[in-house]
Image (tube, helix red, strand yellow):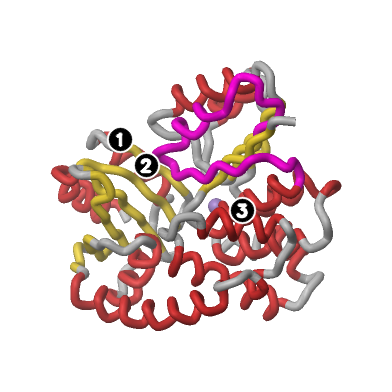
Amino acid sequence: MKSYCITHRKDIDGLASGSMSVAATGGELLLSDYDDMVDNLRKVPDDAERVVVTDLGADSADFAQFLGEMQRVARHARVTYIDHHYMSDPAKRKLRKAGVQVVHDVRECASMLTYRTFRDVLPEGARLNALCGAVTDYMDDSPMARKLMEKGDRHFVLLEATMLSLALGNRAEEAGFPEMVVAELAAMKLPHEIAGVPEAAVRQLGKEEALGDEVKKGGKKLGRLAYMVTSQYSTGNVAKLLIGAFDVPVGVSMKEKNPGWYEVSLRGTSECKVHLGRTIAKVAGSLGGSGGGHRKAAGCRVPTSRADEMLKALSKRV
Ligand SMILES: [Mn+2]
């Protein structure tokens, strides 16, 4: 059977979700980011029979294109879309109308939802994969994650999850590394058993300590937010460090991934007054970009020439 598993490449929630959909369906893995999600869907041939898309917030500016591709694929294949990024009811309705099975809940991470979807065909070890996604997405106090966590040793889970996340932070840009991690997790290897993972995690701890100093020097405060331009792979990490370094509710890190465009990560604390994902969707949209995400973790793309406007608009709201 020709099947495909498309999942978010940038974090452990995405990789763990992909590992479970691969384990459950035997599909070919296509790792994706938000900005090349439609391109990756285009790679799925018309005669595919099974497609699972996980952890890729699709309710953004290019939803029309995304929907078009999902409609094409769903004409022949059984398609499941599993996600926890905010998605409007009309968008969900349109996907369902196209024949797509939509598993959506903003209270759980994508890994938990994927685990729940395929639980009947997954081995018991998949529980840890699901928990790794929950811990690293800061969603382990969700109803489902809390219950699963009680069935094992919390410290064991936290260490495995954190080790995996640090290792990805260290080697994410290495060709084939994230794919290898998904394949090993799909084979139900524990993170500490995956070759190179413990070593990469320890190296990353050293790097993050140095990064903390860099953020203190390079960041700037603007009202209730702090921001910085970075070349780090994990912009989310820089955003988090900015919060601590400048004692503000919101951190914003910006990276010029493609010339003329910033890829922006936003992180917030409980003292942030707005839903960051929805707020940045509006702000970035009004500046010719696009964005979205969760309450305390979000991202967007904006033209570099409009970054100052974005920061000012954000600082007024958060
Ligand atoms: Mn996620």
Q: Earlier in the sequence, mark 3 or mark 2?
A: 3
Instruction: Point out the tag, 1 or 2, that comes first from the N-terminus.
Output: 1
Span highlighted in magenta in the image: 24-51
- For badge 2, the amino acid type reads Gly
Residue at left 66%, top 25%?
Answer: 48
User: Residue 154, image x and y in percent?
Assistant: 71, 77
Circle 3 residue? 109
Q: CA distance from mark 3 to mark 2?
A: 19 Å
Separation of residues labelled 1 and 3 (CA atoms): 25 Å
Give the residue drawn at x 41%, y 59%: 173
Q: Is residue 102 magenta?
A: no
| Mark 2 Cα shell of 10 Å, populated few (<14), some (14-19), many (≥20) | many
Residue with the mark numbered 1: 285
Question: Where residue 202 sits in the image (x, y, percent)?
Answer: 49, 81
Can you identify the residue that label 2 sits on?
Answer: 291
Pointer 3 residue Cβ closer than 8 Å to ligand 1: yes
Q: Nearer the viewer, residue 8 or 106?
A: 8
